[in-house]
Image (cartoon, rainbow, N blue to C red):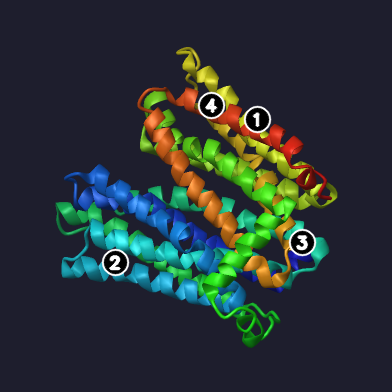
Amino acid sequence: MIALRESRNLVLLWAGQFISQTGDFLFQATVLFLILTIEPAQGALKAGTVSTLETLPFLLFGLLAGSLVDRYRRRTMMLLSDAARGLLLFAVPLLWALGWLSWVSLGAIAFLLSTFSTLFNPARDALIPSLVGKERLVQANAWVQTSTQLAMITGTLLAGVLLSVQTGSGGGAGEDEVLPMIRLLVLDGLTFFVSFLCVWLIRVDEPPLGSRRREVPSAWREAVEGLRYAWGSPVLRGLLLLTAIDNLFIMGPAVVGANLFVKQTLELEARHLAFFQAALAAGWLLGTLGMLRYGKRLPKGKLLLLGIAMDGATYLPFLAFLSGDVRSYGLSLALIAFHGLFIPLITVTRTSLIQELVPPERLGRVFALVNLTVVGFMALSSFATGALGEALEAPWLFGLAGAGGALSGLVGAWVFPALRKQP
């Protein structure tokens, strides 16, 4: 840990990630409410459409983005992504002043933000092996990923506080509601320029551009080659398939089910959902700190499979909330925090395994495949959870997800022996 703290590049990467991802959570807490406020007619449909537009770029451009990351300098891709996302968010107050702010324009901004994010995330993960030695990858990934959990806590709570203190600051009834949310989106834009500065200050030696671009003339051909490479590796194939199955079971309840649980099962308000999410992030952070301290000593393959199994098993206790006598909000916070403890066993070990196994010239494409798998199956899981939520109570959704997730981890240990045996 001491060596990580002394690493200038990792500290800069961590700081930029923490600040920009805090802004990301401001965006997530604001944009759909802004749509419901400025265009309440068919607001749910418009908000759902914008949410879908935010997901689409990962599905449409994920593989191509990974190819571009492998063709150009990773740091350059990150700088381009941060600058573009900051400018896009600065366009929001201009659109409002011109009277052009609508669900369509916000949907376009959300789509473009995610498009540039498809470049940033694989570039970041592919850059880390250039910043630290192979023996420190687990610690480095755990260190960088703590920024996400802290940002989730900070951004969620900050959004509520800032919106509360700004109430009544506008010139009219509509502005009183809209302007505070627009200011939060501008603040999100500023965070990307802070991240830009942090990434710009990172000093790292990367191969010259030409050596990457001459390998394969077409970016799409590179993307297809990366897919074939990943599928041809027993370890990577098992990792991607288990990632898909686990996210299919888990992510819908985590996103949609949590809202249904707090609103319908516990019959509480939106602020209680924020604290529910903060409790998840707190458990996630503690688990990441545990990986930072002990992860290097444990076999990554077994740790990953254990994480997948526990990612599901820790949802099973929520079945107790089917009883009217067990509706304790405090208990729900403890359970979701306990669930969060095991997420880093998946995220940290998965990232470290890929960085160790995949040659540098293919890292961007493999990480893009992981992002594509996570987001794609999250979208399917969210849709399925919403449909099932019309007939089943939220605790049943958690229970089904928990059983499926736990089973996928246990079966995966048997079906993918190459993954299980990874040191």
Earlier residue among tags 2 and 1: 2
- Distance, label 4 to label 1, CA atoms, is 11 Å
Q: In the image, residue 48 lies at what x, y percent?
A: 31, 46
SS for callout 4 = helix
Q: In the image, residue 14 lies at what x, y percent?
A: 62, 64
**The disc labelled 3 sits on which kind of residue?**
Glu
Up/down of 265 relative to 423, above or below: above
Earlier residue among tags 3 and 4: 3
Earlier residue among tags 2 and 3: 2
Q: Which residue is mark 1?
A: 407
**The disc labelled 2 sits on which kind of residue?**
Val
Q: Which residue is mark 3?
A: 356
**The disc labelled 4 sits on which kind of residue?**
Leu
Earlier residue among tags 1 and 3: 3
Q: Quadrant of residue 394?
A: top left
SS for callout 2 = helix
- Distance, label 2 to label 4, CA atoms, is 40 Å
Q: Which residue is mark 2?
A: 92
